[in-house]
Image (cartoon, rainbow, N blue to C red):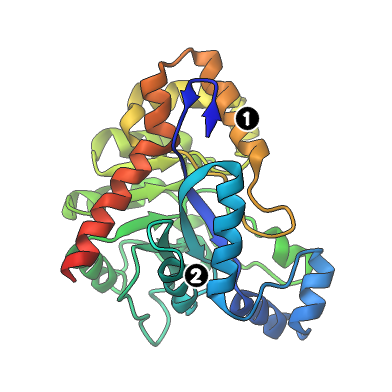
Amino acid sequence: MQTPWGECAVADAHIHFFSRRFFEALAAQSGKTADTVSGTLGWELPPADSADLARRWAEELGVEGVSRAALIASTPGDEASVIAAAAACPGRFLAYAMVNPMAESPPALAGLDGLCFFPAMHRYSMQDARVEPMLEQAAVQRLVVFVHCGVLTVGVRKKLGLPSPFDMRFSNPLDLHAIALRYPQVNFVVPHFGAGYFREALMLADLCPNVYLDTSSSNSWMRYEGLDLTAVFRRALEVAGHSRLLFGTDSSFFPRGWNYEIFEQQTHALLELGISGSDARRIMGENFRSLCDRADSSSATR
């Protein structure tokens, strides 16, 4: 992709893969059909075959010039959709899946590249003993561990009239400190700069060299701290450095597709800081591709 720093192999560390099963799960919760859900949201109902949706994303990202991306299965139990997506487009996607350690049946982790924990959504602490088996497996399989911290709002649930009984007591990035130290071989990703727990996310990243921050979404939490995106990047670079920031958009649905506006906002902020081309290329793609390479090498030995 052509960027203000010249040609850059941009990679997106945060795209939600809203499969047909995701829509069906919302339909079951709201007492509607999947077609009605998609109509209410104004989103396209994805094809039943996840491989077809993966090819749609690959085409969309190819047009935008995005080289690789993490696709996140965004409802527990939907691991198969992102595994199929990654298989349909070799070398383009990492397969991440939302997991709920509190569920009675543990998910099948084979074929995944990353586990996504949403403690506030499912109301547990990352220190809970029921999380540990998944972390142990992540260490064995060398999976990325993505942990959503801070403010969590799911607009789609509000539009459908569904409750969101989340519990922010479990949202503090510092809940990861002892865990990240216990599993130094695991790369942990905290999205949205900690989503309101920015100070705590920086403390965690400062103390744990295996913690990355992803830059995705509108980062509307900045209003809590009186910051703008340029100030957020400046502080994150001062603490975590250019090698542990992962560019992401939080893109999710069609017909919008890839959220180019987020890319523009973030490149503008980095330009204001006057960072070098080499540092910009690390943030915009190289850091994520290093995680991809690690996942690829791990997959080859599983």
User: Label 1 belongs to which residue?
Assistant: 265
What is the C-alpha distance between the residues marked 2 and 1? 31 Å
Task: Give the camera-side residue of 122 and 19.
Answer: 19
Q: Quadrant of residue 83?
A: bottom left
Query: At 41% from the left edge and 47% from the top edge, which residue is drawn?
Result: 190
Task: Confirm or deny contact between disc 2 and disc 1 (CB under 8 A).
Answer: no
Q: How many numbered callouts?
A: 2
Residue closest to the eye, 77 or 292: 292
> Does 229 sit above or below residue 286?
above
Asked whether 55 or 168 is in front, the reply is 55
In percent of width and height, residue 7 lies at 47, 28
Circle 2 residues within 10 Å: few <14, some 14–19, many ≥20: some
Q: Secondary structure at mark 2?
A: helix
**Residue 61 seen from this side:** yes
Residue 252 x %, y %: 62, 57
- Is 163 left or right of 111, judged from the image as shown? right
Identify the mark nearer the N-term, 2 or 1: 2
Would you name the residue on which mark 2 appears? Answer: 122
Please give the label number shown on residue 164: none
Quarter of the picture holding the C terminus: bottom left
- Amino acid type of disc 1? Gln
Q: Position of residue 173 (x, y in %)?
A: 39, 47
Quarter of the image where one finds residue 299: bottom left
Residue 163, given in percent of the width and then of the height, sits at 70, 70
Query: Mark 1 Cα within 10 Å, few/some/many (few <14, many 20+)?
Result: some
Whether residue 227 is visible here, answered yes or no, is no
| Element at label 1 | helix
Could you tell whether 13 is left or right of 205 in the image?
right
Q: Please tell me whether residue 133 is drawn above or below residue 180 in the rendered image.
A: below
The residue type indicated by label 2 comes to His
**Residue at screen point 63% across, 30% down:** 264
Relative to 46, residue 14 above or below:
above
